[in-house]
Amino acid sequence: MPLTVRPTLPQDEQFLYQLVYQTMSEQLFAWTWDPNIRDKLLDLQIRAKHGSYAAEYPHANHGIIVWDDEPVGRLIVDRSGEFHVLVTSPSA
């Protein structure tokens, strides 16, 4: 069961969205929200997070963490400056 990291591919978009959605949903107790607004609010948060990463780390490398041939997470590393930065946030 090797753990590997591979570059993010266009077909990973849905996996990444679901990963962030699930993480944010748990952190924000979104299951308690009105179902009529939950998905819209989480979608806004997810798009804002992706936009923020793109603006703050435009040269970062995006990777998919793979465990036993299944995607299980993501890794964002910015190597553009003097130091390498592991991009992290309170959520995925």
Image (spheres, rainbow, N blue to C red):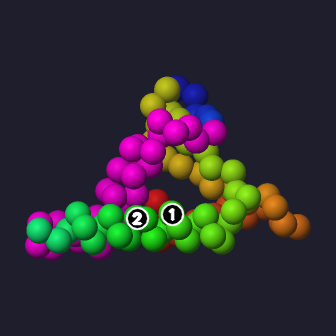
Badge 2 amino acid: Ile
Question: Along the horizontal axis of the image, is 63 left or right of 43?
Answer: right
Where is mark 1, residue-wise?
50
Q: Main secondary structure of the magenta part?
A: helix
Point 53% across, 49% down: residue: 74
> Is any atom of residue 32 visible in this view?
no
Q: Position of residue 63 (x, y in %)?
A: 61, 45
Residue at x 79% of width, y 58% of height: 79
Q: Find the residue positioned furthest to the right.
A: 82
Along the horizontal axis of the image, is 67 left or right of 84?
A: left
Does the stretch in magenta take in 25? Answer: yes
Instruction: Tell me where residue 82 sits by quadrant.
Output: bottom right
Counting every numbered tag in the picture gives 2
Please give the range of residues in magenta: 7-35
Q: Secondary structure at mark 1?
A: helix
Residue 45: x, y in percent? 38, 70
**Residue depicted at x 55% and y 71%:** 52
Picture residue at 32% right of the left edge, 64% below the top: 43
Q: Do we see residue 49 in this rendering?
A: yes
Compared with 6, 75 (above or below) is below
Q: Residues within 10 Å of mark 2 (few under 14, many from 20)?
A: some
Mark 1 and mark 2 in contact? Answer it, CB < 8 Å: yes
Give coordinates of residue 41: x percent, y percent. 27, 71
Quarter of the image for residue 34 reads bottom left
Instruction: Specify the amino acid type for callout 1.
Output: His
> What residue is pinned by disc 2?
46
Q: Secondary structure at mark 2?
A: helix
